[in-house]
């Protein structure tokens, strides 16, 4: 196990709604990243947080936002959901000494 | 982000054979090249990773070969076993100051090892 947990496991929302996904990473892993994995595709980088500040972002619109908390937990928020937002959302925490990212099991989001 | 191109899309190998998956990248600033293994319903798990200062890295049955001039790297799985059946992703990232940026992933290779 990677020590990275995510909740919920599955989620169904309708278009236009807002959603919050949660991640809990390992103690001492100060960097957390979020990825979107569409069916049959590789994960795509959404953004990264280091010590509670966003310090990197992929090609995703501002309606994708996040928070990182001092207790090594984090959130991904998506506003105004679109059908194309249906995907597996992965959280990854980084072990800084080895630069290794450990992924959680993901949250499967379905937008109807 | 620059694209990482992965091939083949799917691969069938007999038990005991060698599985080979290839990736090519464009961004010469990439400095870290991991391979991830993903089983259905699970998140990607790190298999092996390499930095461009070496041309090959071996861990057990898994070997990464890296060709900096060609901007290509590959994963070799020796003595492939049915338990290796999974989707494999190559990835790349930049090491920027205090840490790596987001990973850029290939589209994945669905590997099936036939008994």
Image (spheres, rainbow, N blue to C red):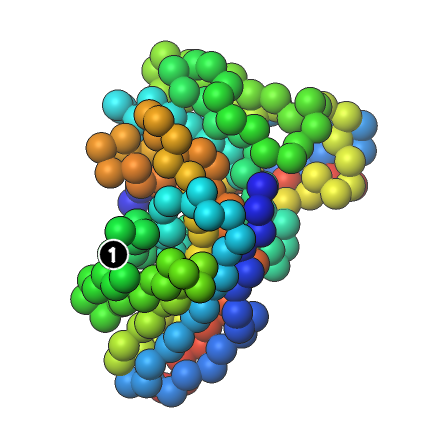
Q: Residue at x 27, y 24 (%)?
A: A27
Q: Quadrant of residue B58?
A: bottom left
Q: Residue at x 23, y 61 (%)?
A: B57
Vertical order, B32 against B64 (above or below): above
In terms of depth relative to the viewer, which is nearer, A73 or B9? Answer: B9
Q: Quadrant of residue A78?
A: top right
In terms of depth relative to the viewer, which is nearer, B102 or B47? Answer: B102
Residue that label 1 marks: B54
Residue A4 position in % (x across, y down)? 36, 35
For label 1, the crowd category at 10 Å Cα-Cα, with few meaning under 14, some 14 to 19 and many 20 or more, is few
Q: Residue at x 31, y 78 (%)?
A: B80
| The furthest residue to the left | B60
In terms of depth relative to the viewer, which is nearer, A54 or B26? Answer: B26
In terms of depth relative to the viewer, which is nearer, A9 or A47? Answer: A47
Vertical order, A47 against B7 (above or below): above
Residue A6 appears in the picture as rendered: no
Q: Residue at x 63, y 50 (%)?
A: A38
Residue A52 position in % (x across, y down)? 43, 14
Looking at the figure, which quarter contains the N terminus of chain B? Answer: top right
């Amino acid at each position: 196990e990677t020590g990275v947990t995510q909740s919920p496991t599955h989620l169904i929302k309708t278009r236009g709604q807002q959603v919050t996904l949660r991640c809990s990473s390992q103690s001492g892993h100060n960097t957390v990243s979020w990825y979107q994995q569409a069916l049959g595709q590789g994960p795509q980088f959404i953004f990264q947080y280091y010590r509670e500040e966003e310090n990197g972002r992929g090609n995703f619109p501002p309606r994708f936002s996040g928070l990182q908390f001092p207790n090594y937990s984090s959130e991904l928020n998506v506003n105004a959901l679109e059908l194309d937002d249906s995907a597996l959302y992965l959280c990854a925490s980084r072990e800084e000494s080895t630069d290794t990212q450990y992924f959680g099991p993901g949250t499967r989001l379905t937008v109807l | 982000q620059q694209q990482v191109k992965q091939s083949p899309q799917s691969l069938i190998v007999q038990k005991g054979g060698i599985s080979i998956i290839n990736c090519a990248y464009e961004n010469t600033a990439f400095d870290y090249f991991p391979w991830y293994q993903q089983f259905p319903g699970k998140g990607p798990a790190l298999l092996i990773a390499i930095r461009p200062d070496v041309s090959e890295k071996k861990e057990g049955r898994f070997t990464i070969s890296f060709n900096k001039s060609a901007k290509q790297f590959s994963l070799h799985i020796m003595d492939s076993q049915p338990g290796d059946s999974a989707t494999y992703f190559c990835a790349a990232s930049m090491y920027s100051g205090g840490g790596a940026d987001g990973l850029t992933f290939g589209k994945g290779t669905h590997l099936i090892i036939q008994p």
